Amino acid sequence: MEGKRIGILTSGGDCPGLNAVIRAVLKAATRKGWDVYGIPYSTDGFIDIAEGKIDPESLKLKEHGLDLPGPLKGLDILQFLSGTILGSLSKESHKNYVEQLREGYRKLGLDALVAVGGDGSLRIIYELGTEGLEAKDHWNLIAIPKTIDNDVPFTERAIGFGTAVEIVTQALYDLTFTAAAHDRIMVVQVMGRQAGHLALHAGIAGGSDIILIPELVPYLSQSVVEGCCHQIAQLRDRGRKFALVVVAEGVKNADNRWDKEIGEHLAQQIKERARDLCASGVETFCDLDRVDTRATVLGHLQRSHTPFAWDRTLAALFGTKAVQLIEEGQKQRLLVWQAGQVQSEPLPDVIDLIKIRHAEKKCASPVDPSNPMVEAAQSLGIYLGI
Ligand code: F6P
């Protein structure tokens, strides 16, 4: 069988499971006698190759096995590690270097490139590898979706999302007891950019009383904040003195603006609204006015845990399928998880949709308000601001 040369890069914000994908591609390709080249720092690596700063042969990846003592000798830890051994890039630094980038790609002489990225980075790589190029010069791309935001179109799951859900769920559990000890309202700010998948999934799993996501609550209007006060007051009437509130970072503040501290802002808004309502003679909210609120920003902790089982499994499925597609001569495909199976979609269609959504300044794959998770949350009595 003809030995192929394939490249792999990781792009955009890191997330748990990237190394597991690299490992899966490497293992499956090595078994076929192919060579796998790891491009450092996403497409930036091509610049260094073009400029002769990196010898392409030094990028050839070897199956990992650590030189540990005793029975641990040869242990392959790649699938357990978060981050990415290749490094990643979350800025659009390529624009001024298109020719160098393309020159670096050509120098490597790849049969195909596996690009592990989110909506933004996959779009950049696709455009770089196709726009203005003759069809014969197009990069042969196989894309693998990754992001804790879970907002790559056509796939129900992206690498990293499952682990991030677990991390946020665990954080909610941990915060429950300190909240309860002081009868506090604990507001937890969750990542996700303009998407609310992470907040919604983890909020339900973590037993939240309120979950606010941008798809349902674009900004903290007076009625939404008042709804939060009602929900908390009702809980207190029933004897539950603490409350857990999840807010996705994509929800805008009371002035309809992005706010890096939206959790803190929401906590203050709840207090202020409760105070106003109490002052206007609504007795229920006077109790609430005296309650402490605290905000926690989970931040990058959501991205860096060792990948949990689902992300390792998905990495194995996506990584091995990528190698299979390359062997079949397929190109410009995005691997997706749909209805319990790994499938692939035409990458140009995916990129077209991403471009439309980006032009509208919208999330590439938002939570659908008719998603059963929304209905389930409501049936559980969780306040969603609608
Ligand atoms: O897209 C992934 C993500 O973690 C978002 O949820 C978050 O808003 C953003 O990246 C943070 O980016 P940075 O690591 O550049 O601060």
Image: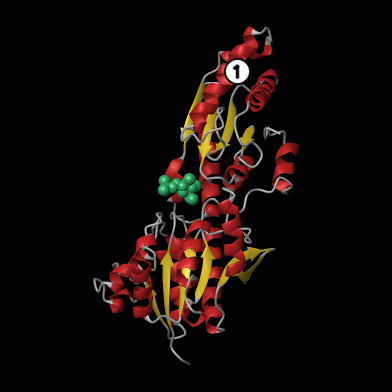
Q: As rendered, which of 204 and 77 lies closer to the eye?
A: 204
Task: From this view, report whether residue 8 is shown above or below residue 305.
Answer: below
Q: Is residue 54 left or right of residue 332?
A: left
Number of residues whose C-alpha sits closer than 10 Å to that of mark 1, classed few (under 14), some (14–19) or many (20 or more):
many
Task: From this view, report whether residue 57 is shown above or below residue 304.
Answer: below
Q: Quadrant of residue 59?
A: bottom left
Colour treatment of the image: secondary structure
Q: Looking at the picture, how far across and down is residue 60, in whole percent?
A: 34, 77
What amino acid is labelled 1 in the image? Arg
- The answer to whether any part of residue 65 appears in the image is no
Residue located at (64% from left, 22% from top): 229
Residue located at (55% from left, 69% from top): 318
Q: As rendered, which of 362 and 24 lies closer to the eye?
A: 362
Q: Is residue 105 left or right of residue 231?
A: left
Q: Circle 1 sits on which residue?
A: 273
Task: From this view, report whether residue 19 is shown above or below residue 289.
Answer: below
Q: As rendered, which of 349 and 375 lies closer to the eye?
A: 349
Q: Looking at the picture, how far across and down is residue 209, in whole percent?
A: 64, 32
Q: Is residue 288 left or right of residue 237?
A: left
